[in-house]
Image (tube, grey):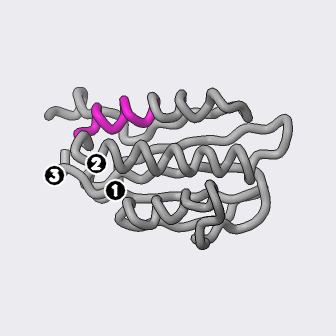
Amino acid sequence: MNETMQPSLLRERFCRRERRSVPAVREFVGTAAADWGFEARADDVLLCVSELATNALLHGVPPGRGFLVRLRLVEGGRELLVEVHDSGGGVPVVREPCGESGRGLLLVDALADRWGVGERDPGKVVWCVFSGPAPM
């Protein structure tokens, strides 16, 4: 692939604090994953981004604010980095499920190759990485 045809290595989308943001994020991420050749990991990526976006809405986005989803190809295009930025406090941790909730980060932990939490001002960024195709 020549330089002029190489896809962008970064995509991002700002989302409002509303329920319809989660399906919109799934569509956005699904398109990027397909464009970048991550079809084999698409189910894992989409489930994890759904969980992280839902967590941002429920726990990390104060009223009147939104959250940012940033996707990057890293490691020469061999990995897809998914970041969900929010302005809320606290540090998310994997915990035992309680009734119908509490499984989000368990799923991310099981499906992503690695994940973590970083600081930002204000708030945090929760990220996860997925290995994929050979370098572009």
Mark 2 or mark 1: whose residue is earlier in sequence? 2
Q: Secondary structure at mark 1?
A: strand
Which quarter of the picture shows residue 37? top left
Please name the residue that numbered disc 2 is placed on: 41
In the picture, the disc for residue 130 is 1
The answer to whether 47 appears left or right of 84 in the picture is left
Residue at the right extreme, as displayed: 63
Q: Residue at x 46, y 60 (%)?
A: 107
Magenta span contains residue 30:
yes
Query: Are the residues tagged 2 and 1 within 8 Å (C-beta)?
Result: yes
- Amino acid at dot 2: Arg
Residue range in magenta is 28-37
The answer to whether 60 appears left or right of 131 in the picture is right
Percent across and percent down for residue 5 are: 22, 27
Please name the residue that numbered disc 3 is placed on: 134
Percent across and percent down for residue 114 are: 41, 67
How many circles with numbers are drawn on the protein? 3
